[in-house]
Image (spheres, coloured by chain):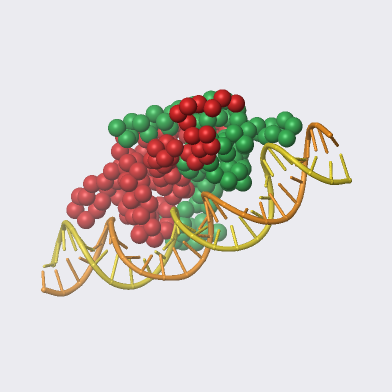
Chain colours: A red, B green, C yellow, D orange
Amino acid sequence: MVILPNSKKENKKMDNKKLLELKSNTKILKAMSHPTRLFILEELSKCEKCVCELTEMIGVDISTISKHLYVLKNAGLVENEKRGLTVYYKLKSISVLNLIDFIRKVIKNNTE
Amino acid sequence: MVILPNSKKENKKMDNKKLLELKSNTKILKAMSHPTRLFILEELSKCEKCVCELTEMIGVDISTISKHLYVLKNAGLVENEKRGLTVYYKLKSISVLNLIDFIRKVIKNNTE
DNA sequence: GCAATACTTGGTTATTTTGCCAAATAGTAA
DNA sequence: TTACTATTTGGCAAAATAACCAAGTATTGC
Protein backbone atom coordinates (compact mmCIF):
# COMPACT_ATOMS: atom_id res chain seq x y z
CA MET A 1 0.00 0.00 0.00
CA VAL A 2 1.28 3.46 -0.92
CA ILE A 3 1.80 5.98 1.88
CA LEU A 4 0.95 9.45 0.67
CA PRO A 5 3.25 12.20 2.01
CA ASN A 6 0.54 14.57 3.20
CA SER A 7 -1.82 12.10 4.79
CA LYS A 8 -1.60 10.80 8.30
CA LYS A 9 -0.82 7.19 8.09
CA GLU A 10 -3.52 5.88 10.40
CA ASN A 11 -6.11 8.66 10.40
CA LYS A 12 -9.30 6.81 11.28
CA LYS A 13 -11.76 9.57 12.26
CA MET A 14 -13.64 11.29 9.48
CA ASP A 15 -12.58 14.80 8.58
CA ASN A 16 -14.41 17.25 10.85
CA LYS A 17 -15.36 19.58 8.03
CA LYS A 18 -16.91 16.73 6.10
CA LEU A 19 -18.82 15.65 9.20
CA LEU A 20 -20.27 19.11 9.71
CA GLU A 21 -21.33 19.25 6.07
CA LEU A 22 -23.06 15.90 6.42
CA LYS A 23 -24.80 17.00 9.60
CA SER A 24 -26.18 20.09 7.99
CA ASN A 25 -27.34 18.02 5.03
CA THR A 26 -29.21 15.59 7.22
CA LYS A 27 -31.10 18.40 8.92
CA ILE A 28 -33.61 18.71 6.11
CA LEU A 29 -34.02 14.94 5.91
CA LYS A 30 -34.41 14.59 9.66
CA ALA A 31 -37.11 17.24 9.64
CA MET A 32 -39.08 15.20 7.11
CA SER A 33 -38.56 11.93 8.95
CA HIS A 34 -41.55 11.90 11.22
CA PRO A 35 -45.03 10.72 10.23
CA THR A 36 -46.70 13.83 11.59
CA ARG A 37 -44.26 16.17 9.89
CA LEU A 38 -44.47 14.35 6.58
CA PHE A 39 -48.25 14.60 6.81
CA ILE A 40 -48.00 18.32 7.51
CA LEU A 41 -45.76 18.79 4.48
CA GLU A 42 -48.19 16.87 2.30
CA GLU A 43 -51.07 18.99 3.52
CA LEU A 44 -49.17 22.23 3.08
CA SER A 45 -48.30 21.17 -0.46
CA LYS A 46 -52.03 21.49 -1.17
CA CYS A 47 -52.58 24.86 0.51
CA GLU A 48 -51.48 26.89 3.51
CA LYS A 49 -53.03 25.97 6.85
CA CYS A 50 -53.11 27.27 10.39
CA VAL A 51 -51.84 25.37 13.44
CA CYS A 52 -55.42 24.86 14.52
CA GLU A 53 -56.46 23.12 11.31
CA LEU A 54 -53.45 20.83 11.32
CA THR A 55 -54.05 19.97 14.96
CA GLU A 56 -57.65 19.08 14.19
CA MET A 57 -56.60 16.82 11.29
CA ILE A 58 -53.86 15.02 13.18
CA GLY A 59 -55.42 14.77 16.61
CA VAL A 60 -52.57 15.37 19.00
CA ASP A 61 -51.96 18.23 21.40
CA ILE A 62 -51.61 21.63 19.74
CA SER A 63 -48.30 22.18 21.50
CA THR A 64 -46.96 19.05 19.83
CA ILE A 65 -48.00 20.32 16.40
CA SER A 66 -46.49 23.70 17.17
CA LYS A 67 -43.18 22.03 17.97
CA HIS A 68 -43.25 19.95 14.81
CA LEU A 69 -43.85 23.11 12.82
CA TYR A 70 -40.88 24.69 14.53
CA VAL A 71 -38.70 21.79 13.38
CA LEU A 72 -39.90 22.21 9.80
CA LYS A 73 -39.36 25.95 9.90
CA ASN A 74 -35.94 25.54 11.43
CA ALA A 75 -34.97 23.21 8.59
CA GLY A 76 -36.08 25.84 6.10
CA LEU A 77 -38.95 23.77 4.77
CA VAL A 78 -41.87 25.99 5.76
CA GLU A 79 -42.56 29.60 6.60
CA ASN A 80 -45.32 31.23 8.59
CA GLU A 81 -47.31 34.41 8.74
CA LYS A 82 -49.52 35.71 11.51
CA ARG A 83 -52.84 37.23 10.55
CA GLY A 84 -54.84 38.27 13.55
CA LEU A 85 -54.75 35.54 16.14
CA THR A 86 -53.98 32.87 13.62
CA VAL A 87 -50.60 31.68 12.37
CA TYR A 88 -50.62 30.29 8.84
CA TYR A 89 -47.94 27.92 7.61
CA LYS A 90 -46.97 27.15 4.03
CA LEU A 91 -44.16 25.46 2.13
CA LYS A 92 -41.18 27.70 1.70
CA SER A 93 -40.07 26.74 -1.79
CA ILE A 94 -41.09 24.78 -4.80
CA SER A 95 -38.08 22.51 -4.44
CA VAL A 96 -39.49 21.15 -1.20
CA LEU A 97 -42.65 20.26 -3.04
CA ASN A 98 -40.63 18.51 -5.70
CA LEU A 99 -38.71 16.62 -3.08
CA ILE A 100 -41.89 15.32 -1.52
CA ASP A 101 -43.16 14.17 -4.89
CA PHE A 102 -39.87 12.57 -5.72
CA ILE A 103 -39.65 10.70 -2.47
CA ARG A 104 -43.21 9.50 -2.88
CA LYS A 105 -42.25 8.06 -6.27
CA VAL A 106 -39.12 6.36 -4.93
CA ILE A 107 -41.08 4.91 -2.05
CA LYS A 108 -43.72 3.66 -4.45
CA ASN A 109 -41.05 2.08 -6.64
CA ASN A 110 -39.32 0.52 -3.68
CA THR A 111 -42.40 -1.03 -2.16
CA GLU A 112 -43.74 -2.51 -5.38
CA MET B 1 -71.76 14.38 9.10
CA VAL B 2 -72.53 10.68 9.02
CA ILE B 3 -71.97 8.79 12.24
CA LEU B 4 -70.66 5.36 11.44
CA PRO B 5 -71.76 2.68 13.90
CA ASN B 6 -68.25 1.55 14.74
CA SER B 7 -66.56 4.91 15.02
CA LYS B 8 -66.33 7.16 18.00
CA LYS B 9 -68.25 10.35 17.34
CA GLU B 10 -65.44 12.78 18.04
CA ASN B 11 -62.49 10.75 16.95
CA LYS B 12 -59.76 13.30 16.59
CA LYS B 13 -56.86 10.90 16.11
CA MET B 14 -55.66 10.41 12.59
CA ASP B 15 -56.92 7.43 10.66
CA ASN B 16 -54.79 4.42 11.59
CA LYS B 17 -54.34 3.29 8.03
CA LYS B 18 -53.06 6.72 7.01
CA LEU B 19 -50.71 6.73 9.98
CA LEU B 20 -49.24 3.38 9.00
CA GLU B 21 -48.75 4.58 5.46
CA LEU B 22 -46.94 7.67 6.72
CA LYS B 23 -44.77 5.59 9.01
CA SER B 24 -43.69 3.34 6.21
CA ASN B 25 -42.95 6.37 4.06
CA THR B 26 -40.78 7.99 6.71
CA LYS B 27 -38.75 4.81 7.06
CA ILE B 28 -36.69 5.57 3.97
CA LEU B 29 -36.22 9.19 5.04
CA LYS B 30 -35.27 8.23 8.57
CA ALA B 31 -32.71 5.81 7.23
CA MET B 32 -31.05 8.63 5.30
CA SER B 33 -31.19 11.06 8.22
CA HIS B 34 -27.91 10.32 9.88
CA PRO B 35 -24.55 11.78 8.85
CA THR B 36 -22.84 8.42 8.81
CA ARG B 37 -25.61 6.78 6.80
CA LEU B 38 -25.77 9.64 4.31
CA PHE B 39 -22.03 9.34 3.89
CA ILE B 40 -22.32 5.60 3.32
CA LEU B 41 -24.98 6.17 0.66
CA GLU B 42 -22.79 8.73 -1.07
CA GLU B 43 -19.87 6.34 -1.06
CA LEU B 44 -21.94 3.42 -2.30
CA SER B 45 -23.23 5.62 -5.10
CA LYS B 46 -19.65 5.59 -6.41
CA CYS B 47 -19.05 1.87 -6.05
CA GLU B 48 -19.77 -1.08 -3.80
CA LYS B 49 -17.76 -1.35 -0.62
CA CYS B 50 -17.27 -3.78 2.21
CA VAL B 51 -18.00 -3.05 5.88
CA CYS B 52 -14.31 -2.92 6.55
CA GLU B 53 -13.63 -0.19 4.00
CA LEU B 54 -16.51 1.94 5.22
CA THR B 55 -15.37 1.52 8.82
CA GLU B 56 -11.89 2.63 7.85
CA MET B 57 -13.22 5.74 6.09
CA ILE B 58 -15.57 6.78 8.87
CA GLY B 59 -13.55 5.84 11.91
CA VAL B 60 -16.07 4.46 14.35
CA ASP B 61 -16.47 0.97 15.70
CA ILE B 62 -17.21 -1.67 13.06
CA SER B 63 -20.28 -2.79 14.99
CA THR B 64 -21.68 0.71 14.69
CA ILE B 65 -21.19 0.68 10.92
CA SER B 66 -22.72 -2.75 10.70
CA LYS B 67 -25.81 -1.50 12.49
CA HIS B 68 -26.07 1.54 10.24
CA LEU B 69 -25.87 -0.76 7.23
CA TYR B 70 -28.65 -2.83 8.72
CA VAL B 71 -30.85 0.26 8.94
CA LEU B 72 -30.16 1.10 5.30
CA LYS B 73 -30.84 -2.46 4.20
CA ASN B 74 -34.01 -2.61 6.24
CA ALA B 75 -35.23 0.55 4.52
CA GLY B 76 -34.61 -1.07 1.16
CA LEU B 77 -31.86 1.34 0.19
CA VAL B 78 -28.93 -1.07 -0.03
CA GLU B 79 -28.29 -4.75 -0.55
CA ASN B 80 -25.36 -6.96 0.36
CA GLU B 81 -23.54 -9.99 -0.87
CA LYS B 82 -21.05 -12.14 0.94
CA ARG B 83 -17.98 -13.23 -0.97
CA GLY B 84 -15.65 -15.23 1.15
CA LEU B 85 -15.24 -13.56 4.51
CA THR B 86 -16.19 -10.18 3.18
CA VAL B 87 -19.66 -8.64 2.94
CA TYR B 88 -20.06 -6.13 0.13
CA TYR B 89 -22.77 -3.49 0.18
CA LYS B 90 -24.17 -1.54 -2.76
CA LEU B 91 -27.14 0.64 -3.58
CA LYS B 92 -30.21 -1.40 -4.27
CA SER B 93 -31.66 0.44 -7.22
CA ILE B 94 -31.04 3.26 -9.61
CA SER B 95 -33.90 5.21 -8.06
CA VAL B 96 -32.00 5.41 -4.78
CA LEU B 97 -29.10 6.95 -6.65
CA ASN B 98 -31.47 9.45 -8.22
CA LEU B 99 -32.94 10.21 -4.83
CA ILE B 100 -29.53 10.97 -3.37
CA ASP B 101 -28.74 13.28 -6.29
CA PHE B 102 -32.09 14.97 -5.97
CA ILE B 103 -31.75 15.53 -2.25
CA ARG B 104 -28.28 16.89 -2.73
CA LYS B 105 -29.69 19.43 -5.16
CA VAL B 106 -32.56 20.44 -2.90
CA ILE B 107 -30.23 20.83 0.05
CA LYS B 108 -27.89 22.93 -2.08
CA ASN B 109 -30.80 25.13 -3.20
CA ASN B 110 -32.09 25.52 0.33
CA THR B 111 -28.79 26.42 1.91
CA GLU B 112 -27.81 28.99 -0.68
C1' DG C 1 -9.58 -30.01 14.49
C1' DC C 2 -7.63 -24.79 15.57
C1' DA C 3 -6.64 -20.00 14.61
C1' DA C 4 -7.52 -15.92 12.08
C1' DT C 5 -10.47 -12.71 9.73
C1' DA C 6 -14.85 -10.12 8.65
C1' DC C 7 -18.83 -9.27 10.24
C1' DT C 8 -23.15 -9.38 13.28
C1' DT C 9 -25.60 -9.46 17.61
C1' DG C 10 -26.46 -8.57 22.60
C1' DG C 11 -26.05 -5.64 26.32
C1' DT C 12 -25.30 -1.23 28.55
C1' DT C 13 -25.16 3.64 28.87
C1' DA C 14 -25.68 8.29 27.09
C1' DT C 15 -28.13 11.32 24.25
C1' DT C 16 -31.98 12.85 21.54
C1' DT C 17 -36.70 12.98 20.38
C1' DT C 18 -41.48 12.95 21.35
C1' DG C 19 -45.77 14.14 23.55
C1' DC C 20 -48.41 15.81 27.20
C1' DC C 21 -49.66 19.37 30.63
C1' DA C 22 -49.42 23.86 32.46
C1' DA C 23 -48.06 28.45 32.00
C1' DA C 24 -46.82 32.38 29.13
C1' DT C 25 -47.55 35.40 25.10
C1' DA C 26 -50.07 37.91 21.62
C1' DG C 27 -54.02 39.68 19.38
C1' DT C 28 -59.16 40.70 19.51
C1' DA C 29 -63.17 42.35 21.30
C1' DA C 30 -66.49 43.67 24.82
C1' DT D 1 -59.81 46.51 32.12
C1' DT D 2 -61.17 41.68 31.56
C1' DA D 3 -62.17 37.80 28.93
C1' DC D 4 -61.32 34.94 25.12
C1' DT D 5 -58.86 32.62 21.39
C1' DA D 6 -54.65 30.90 18.89
C1' DT D 7 -50.28 29.77 19.46
C1' DT D 8 -45.69 29.14 21.72
C1' DT D 9 -42.68 27.84 25.45
C1' DG D 10 -40.93 25.30 29.63
C1' DG D 11 -40.69 21.24 32.05
C1' DC D 12 -40.95 16.53 32.62
C1' DA D 13 -41.36 11.46 31.65
C1' DA D 14 -41.35 7.89 28.21
C1' DA D 15 -39.56 6.10 24.05
C1' DA D 16 -36.27 5.80 20.42
C1' DT D 17 -31.53 6.15 18.74
C1' DA D 18 -26.57 5.77 18.80
C1' DA D 19 -22.04 4.30 20.28
C1' DC D 20 -19.10 1.29 22.54
C1' DC D 21 -17.41 -3.26 24.17
C1' DA D 22 -17.75 -8.11 24.40
C1' DA D 23 -19.34 -12.28 22.69
C1' DG D 24 -21.15 -14.98 18.83
C1' DT D 25 -21.30 -16.62 13.84
C1' DA D 26 -19.41 -17.81 9.40
C1' DT D 27 -15.70 -18.62 6.24
C1' DT D 28 -10.96 -19.51 5.09
C1' DG D 29 -6.53 -21.72 5.57
C1' DC D 30 -3.34 -24.55 8.18
Task: Tell me which residue sits at (46%, 48%) in the image.
Answer: A34
State the quadrant of the N terminus of chain A: top right
Q: Is residue B41 left or right of residue C20?
A: right
Q: How many marks?
A: 0
Q: Position of residue D3 (x, y in %)?
A: 20, 72
User: Can residue A106 be seen in the rendering of this structure?
Assistant: no
Q: Nearer the viewer, residue A11 or D22?
A: A11
Task: Tell me which residue sits at (43%, 32%) in the image.
Answer: B103
User: Can residue A71 be seen in the rendering of this structure?
Assistant: yes
Q: Nearer the viewer, residue A112 or B8?
A: A112
Q: Position of residue A59 (x, y in %)?
A: 42, 57
Q: Position of residue A99 (x, y in %)?
A: 41, 33
Classify residue D10 by image quadrant. Answer: bottom left
Q: Position of residue A69 (x, y in %)?
A: 34, 50
Eyeballing the image, is B85 above or below D3?
above
Eyeballing the image, is C15 above or below B45?
below
Task: Tell me which residue sits at (50%, 26%) in the image.
Answer: A4
Residue furthest to the front: A5
State the quadrant of the C terminus of chain A: top right
Q: Nearer the viewer, residue A90 or A16?
A: A16
Task: Tell me which residue sits at (52%, 34%) in the image.
Answer: A9
Q: Nearer the viewer, residue B65 or A79?
A: B65
